Every structure is written in C-alpha cells, then in structure tokens.
Image (cartoon, helix red, strand yellow):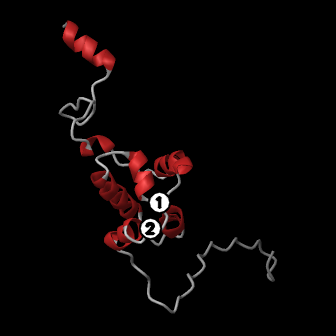
Amino acid sequence: MNRNGQASRPTPFTRAARPEFSSPERRYSVEELYGKLTMDGVSFWTAIFPLYMKREITNADVRDLVRLALIETMGSYKLVNQLFNSPPECYKRLLNFLGKHNLQVDFRQFRKTSIFPIQKGGHHETRRQRARNHSA
C-alpha cells in the first residue's frame, strides 16, 4: 500500500544500462585469426575459444575459420584439429564444441571425391531411398 491507502502498482521492469567501455570495440578479421592458428602456432583453445565465449567473434567468424581449414585439409576435421594446434585427444572436444554451437561446416563439399552421393536438394540419399528408387 502507498501513502494514500491505495494498493500500490508494481513498477515495470527496466533494463539496466550497459556499462560504457573507454576503448573502442575490437573487431578481429578471419584472416588475422586464421594466421594466428596456422602461422603463429597458437592453439584454437587459447586463441579462438575465449574470444567466442566472450562474444568478441561471431558464429560466422568461427564458421569461416572452419571453412578455410576444411579447404586446406580437403575436408578432414581430424586434420583441422591438427591445423588448429589442438592435441589429438581434443578432436572430439572440437567436434562437440562446433556441434553444440551450430558451427560445423559440411566437410563433403571440400573432398575431391565424395563417397556420399549428393542429390539436387543438397541432401545425401539414404540406403532406404536408394533401394526404393532402384526397385521402382
């Protein structure tokens, strides 16, 4: 109740103002980050992961890094792990991280000869679909 004896109304929620930072926002180029990984020998887990988790780089930036690495490794995520200076035991960790954050890029488009047939819609044909198509 307020001073007049009336029921007080709840106040609307207000957003807290974002703190102002004195330094301008740092924008990293994909080429600069890729150079850190491939030329400077910095690990993905020390260079890219923290920037992504602090939201200093975007999903598109990480996807572009992965895409560049897949081009260089001809579609091998195991070699991407190696190229990103990540230990072999972190291969599944890298795949899990990329999958969890929807950052994986389809490796098949970077393979010279794909063992997966691609249909017009961009999806591979399943065994059941092949059997149905060939029996008709």
Percent coordinates x, y for residue 14 in the rendering: 60, 76
Percent coordinates x, y for residue 126 in the rendering: 31, 22
Rendered view: 61 above or below 95 = below
Going by the image, does 127 lie left or right of 90?
Answer: left
**The image quarter in which residue 76 lies:** top left
Q: Which of 11 and 135 is in front in this view?
A: 135
Residue named by callout 2 = 41
In this rendering, does residue 103 appear at all?
no
Q: Which residue lies furthest to the top in this view?
A: 135
Rendered view: 13 above or below 119 = below
Going by the image, does 76 lie left or right of 82?
Answer: left
Going by the image, does 46 lie left or right of 105?
Answer: right
Name the residue located 29 percent from the left edge and 55 percent from the top edge: 72
Q: Which of 6 and 90 is in front in this view?
A: 90
Disc with the residue nearer the chain's start (2 vs 1): 2
Percent coordinates x, y for residue 133 in the rendering: 21, 14
- The reply to whether discs 2 and 1 touch (Cβ–Cβ < 8 Å) is yes
Within 10 Å of disc 1 (Cα), the crowding (few <14, some 14-19, many 20+) is some
> Mark 1: which amino acid?
Asn
Residue named by callout 1 = 85
Percent coordinates x, y for residue 119 in the rendering: 20, 30
Residue at disc 1, secondary structure:
loop
Report the disc number at residue 62: none
> Mark 2: which amino acid?
Gly
Name the residue located 17 percent from the left edge and 33 percent from the top edge: 120
Name the residue located 53 percent from the left edge and 70 percent from the top edge: 54
Q: Nearer the viewer, residue 83 or 123?
A: 83
